[in-house]
Image (tube, rainbow, N blue to C red):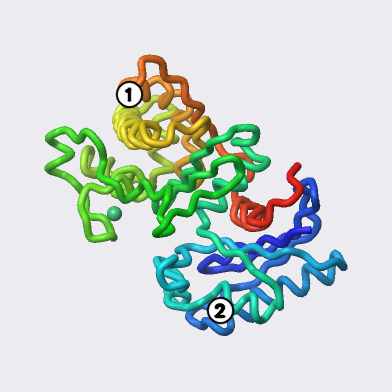
Amino acid sequence: MRIGIDLGGTKIEGVVLGPGGQELARRRLKTPRGDYQDTVDCVAEIVRELEAEVAVPCTVGVAMPGALSPATGLIKNANSTWLNGQPLDKDLSLVLDREVRLANDANCFALSEAVDGAGAGHRVVFGVIVGTGCGGGIVIDGQVLTGGHAIAGEWGHNPLPWPDKEEIKAAPKCYCRKRGCIEAWISGPAIAADHKRETGKTMSTENIAEAAAKGDKKARATIGRLTDRMARSLATVINVIDPDVIVLGGGVSNITALYDLLPAVLPEYVFSEHVKVNVVPNVHGDSSGVRGAAWLWPGETP
Ligand SMILES: [Zn+2]
């Protein structure tokens, strides 16, 4: 059996998955923010409790923001900043007395959906999480593609493709210190900022999507711009890895109109005469982190 841990900034969640992917037990603890050693101990505590509940030894995988740097073996890019610069996999392996596998949470999302979610049965799965940020992961034949810098799938920090004059002028600043990144155009906060720029009105992305669904013209225009920018951004990924399916996750994936609009716009940008890409909502929702982490030890798949 497999244990999957989702190490988030506010909570640490763990599950045990049975051989067919069924959830057998679940635990949750508050993340000891700012304290590395306490975070390691907290993960170990959840693993021991889960193992006690199912009464068999389990493999352990951990999903986390950021990644293990292949160059240094230390955590980098985690917004839970107290993890950065630490050999988290080694410390967890030591305290739990077994090899512990670690992966970026967007990669775990993609893996979870590829194994037994919306991407099941497809060879090449591109999983994207668009919420407060914009991340992504690539799974090929059930294996996460990590890459030499552990950044494979990070499409959010490529520039918005084919920008028009207005977009070049408005190019919003990104936290990565560049301007006009995809994330700075299509993340949840970026959609709200775009709506404000165009209409002068402050609205949450959720409310914009609701208003658009009810026929509000300005909100519909905002969702239209979002769709076009998302289509351009996905097209450049499709032109490189040509995924069989694109699974959307994160808050923005709840905008249901995208699943009707994107397939109609994508052919304008993809380098192919005939374009039929599946863009689908995720199946596992908030459980994608724990489930994907558990599947870092594949063995028998459902
Ligand atoms: Zn950026």
Mark 2–mark 1 distance (CA, rounded to whole Å): 48 Å
Is residue 206 left or right of 118 when viewed as pictured?
A: left
Q: Is residue 202 visible?
A: no
Q: Quadrant of the C terminus?
A: top right
Q: Amino acid at mark 1?
A: Phe
Secondary element at image label 1: loop
> Measured from the top left, where is residue 240 in percent x and y?
37, 36
Residue at image mark 1: 271
Q: Where is residue 254 shown, x and y percent of the image?
A: 50, 39
Q: Closer to the camera, 212 or 18?
A: 18
Q: Is residue 279 above or below residue 107?
A: above
Q: For mark 2, give the secondary structure.
A: loop
**Labelled pair 2, 1 in contact (Cβ < 8 Å):** no
| Badge 1: residue crowd in 10 Å (few <14, some 14–19, many ≥20) | few
Q: Nearer the viewer, residue 300 or 6?
A: 300
Instruction: Name the residue: 54% across, 68% down.
Output: 10
Viewer-proximal residue among 261 and 198:
261
Q: Residue at x 66, y 53 (%)?
A: 295
Circle 2 crowding by C-alpha within 10 Å: few under 14, some 14–19, many from 20: some
Does 157 appear above or below 229? below
For label 2, the residue is 32
Which quadrant, please, contains the N terminus?
A: bottom right
Q: Is residue 185 above or below residue 240?
A: below
Res 122 → quadrant: top right
- The kind of residue tagged 2 is Pro
Quarter of the rendered image showing ligand 1: bottom left
Q: Residue at x 51, y 83 (%)?
A: 35
- Judge depth for marks 2 and 1 and give the one in front: 1
Give left or right: position of 206 versus 174.
Answer: right
Give the number of the disc on residue 77: none
Q: Position of residue 193 (x, y in %)?
A: 28, 47
* Above/below status of 274 relative to 2: above
